[in-house]
Amino acid sequence: MVQIVCIQFSRGVYSMLGSVNPDSFDTLHSYSNTFQMPFVTPWFPEQLFDWLIGGWIGHLEDAED
């Protein structure tokens, strides 16, 4: 996985988007934090934080109006 991520960085990728295996989530999340690169996935970890849930739900409710 390290080689894949490094290849993407060398191509000038600004963010990563896609599904991820739950076993790989922590690794990709760590790369994202280390290199300050946005990582967007529809999969959520089992432990959700209130501030994160509130942010997502707030945006979703606004979109419904």
Image (spheres, rainbow, N blue to C red):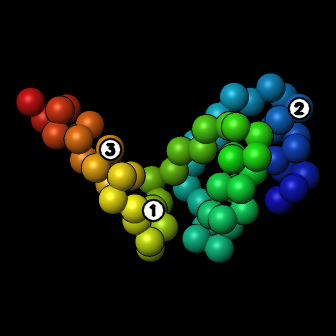
Give the Cα distance between marks 3 and 2.
32 Å
The residue closer to the viewer here, 31 or 23, is 31
Quarter holding the C terminus is top left
Q: Amino acid at mark 1?
A: Phe
Q: Quadrant of residue 46?
A: bottom left
Quarter holding the N terminus is bottom right
**Which residue sits furthest left?**
65
- Label whose residue precedes the other's in the sequence (2 or 1): 2
Q: Which residue is mark 3?
A: 55
In front: label 3 or label 2: 3
Q: Amino acid at mark 3?
A: Gly
x and y, in percent, of residue 6 in the image: 88, 44
Give the Cα distance between marks 3 and 1.
14 Å
Give the Cα distance between marks 2 and 1.
27 Å
Q: Amino acid at mark 2?
A: Ser
Q: Which residue is mark 2?
A: 10
